Image: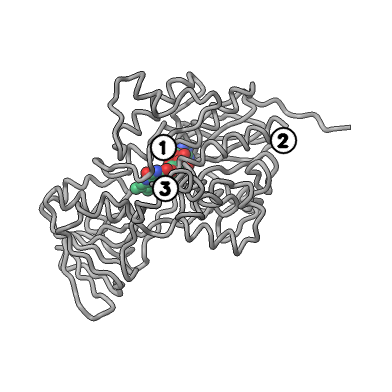
Amino acid sequence: MKPPVASVDFDVIVVGAGPYGLSAAAYLESRGFVVRVFGEPMAFWDRTMPAGMLLRSQRPASTIADPRGAWTLDAYERATGTPAQAPLPLSTFVSYGRWFRERLGDVIDPRTVAGVLRREGGFEVTLADHARASSRRLVVATGIGAFQQRPAMFDRLSPEVVSHCWAGRDLRELAAARVAVIGAGQSALESAALLREHGARVEIIARSRKLRWIGAHKWLHHLGPLSAMLYSRHDVGHAGLSRLVAYPNVIARLPLALRDRIRLRAIRPAGALWLVPRLADVQISTGRTVNEAAMLNGHGVRLRLDDGTERVVDHVLLGTGYRVDLARYEFLSPDLLRQIRRLDGAPVLTAGFSSSVSGLHFIGATAARSYGPLLCFVAGTQFASRHLTAHCAA
Ligand SMILES: Cc1cc2nc3c(=O)[nH]c(=O)nc-3n(C[C@H](O)[C@H](O)[C@H](O)COP(=O)(O)OP(=O)(O)OC[C@H]3O[C@@H](n4cnc5c(N)ncnc54)[C@H](O)[C@@H]3O)c2cc1C
């Protein structure tokens, strides 16, 4: 005989109200699940990304999926009279996410989850105000905000002189400053462009020998049906690879080493092509590594590079990316964390984004090691929400 199942408040609790959490809630609700999403809607995009940013993803890849296909970016723009722009401004995307959230009604609770415990028949979450809620399943959709990667040499320096590109710093405060931007990905390159436009003196210092640009082979996108064979509408990865990345279920069946190669290739540091003219008068030092960083009598930072040259700047902006490590999600209790099978910090997932803890699921970038790079982008919300919901319903 089955043991009695303890009563719970919800069928599913989703932690995190970014694109993945919102989309999952829409799909789960449509299948009759009683759902609650905890977290302030679109907080990561609104609070941490630089104001004035443009989305790197193309418009068709910037829609948050809903089961009826009714809450698309286009539908939002039509409903609100917002002009359709490309590239898409950050402020429009944040407003779109909030519009999507309004359609979900009172499923969303903006409180932060402070702790998660396993309990009989499911999970119990403790909120920041000490209130509690329980559910049979728990979906973690808390994104990459906790995973910022910072070279250790910067740990000793004051946050006044070193910050991560997505730590929410207002770049206008650095308008009169000398700034070294470290990195060669979209965050680093776009932050450098914005800083320059605000009047800062900027140098980009990048390890890679040359900067890479997304969409550099424009002509490959204008070959009609042939282009459609080379690129999926999700637009993640180069010609050919983009098609494979569009099928996370196929990627999940590949050997780990091949999966890793595909993921690293598809999300290697690169900037959107429209950044090229905006960086025209920014100094760019490629093939260079920062070996040492030291405070200068409280005013600025001295950087020593691997070629022996030095830079003295007022601020260092780190565009040094992120690395998934579940241990950095403070809300996962050490006991629960121990029960989650992990590979280099990322959860090992099986069908339905299921972790080794029954009823505990991870969607978004934490799932990319299992399902491939599409899960690092908004374009992956459709696959994630469909697949998760079908699994829960079954
Ligand atoms: C600078 C930058 C530019 C990017 N540009 C693009 C782009 O153009 N296109 C694209 O597709 N992707 C882009 N990305 C990737 C982007 O992070 C993901 O596409 C997207 O955020 C994934 O959505 P998500 O819901 O998984 O995560 P998020 O949007 O990060 O949402 C997770 C939410 O969970 C919340 N949360 C965390 N902990 C808790 C807690 N304990 N309790 C409650 N809530 C919590 C966070 O505040 C956050 O709001 C960009 C990333 C960066 C850093």
Is residue 371 among the parts visible in the rendering? yes
Mark 2 in CB contact with mark 1 (< 8 angstroms):
no
Occupied quadrant, residue 224: top left
Occupied quadrant, residue 151: bottom left
Q: Of callouts 1 and 3, which one flags the residue occurring earlier in the amino acid sequence?
A: 1
Counting from the top left corner in percent of width and height, residue 312 is at 16, 68
Counting from the top left corner in percent of width and height, residue 285 is at 24, 69
Which quarter is ligand 1 in?
A: top left
Which residue ends up furthest to the right in the rendered image? Answer: 1
Q: Of callouts 2 and 1, which one flags the residue occurring earlier in the amino acid sequence?
A: 1
The residue mark sitting in front, 1 or 3, is: 3
Badge 3 crowding class, 10 Å Cα cut-off, few under 14, some 14 to 19, many 20 or more, is: few
Horizontal side of 172 relative to 291 (left or right) equals left
Q: In the rendered image, which residue does mark 3 sit on?
A: 223
Find out if the beta carbon at label 1 lies less than 8 Å from the nearest ligand 1 atom. Answer: yes
Q: Nearer the viewer, residue 152 or 310?
A: 310
Badge 1 crowding class, 10 Å Cα cut-off, few under 14, some 14 to 19, many 20 or more, is: many
Specify the quadrant that holds the C terminus: top right
Badge 2 crowding class, 10 Å Cα cut-off, few under 14, some 14 to 19, many 20 or more, is: few
The Cα atoms of the two marked residues, 2 and 3, are separated by: 57 Å
Residue at the (56%, 30%) spot, across then down: 132
Q: In the rendered image, which residue does mark 2 sit on?
A: 120
The Cα atoms of the two marked residues, 1 and 3, are separated by: 23 Å
Find out if the beta carbon at label 2 lies less than 8 Å from the nearest ligand 1 atom. Answer: no
Q: In the rendered image, which residue does mark 1 sit on?
A: 62
Counting from the top left corner in percent of width and height, residue 24 is at 55, 32
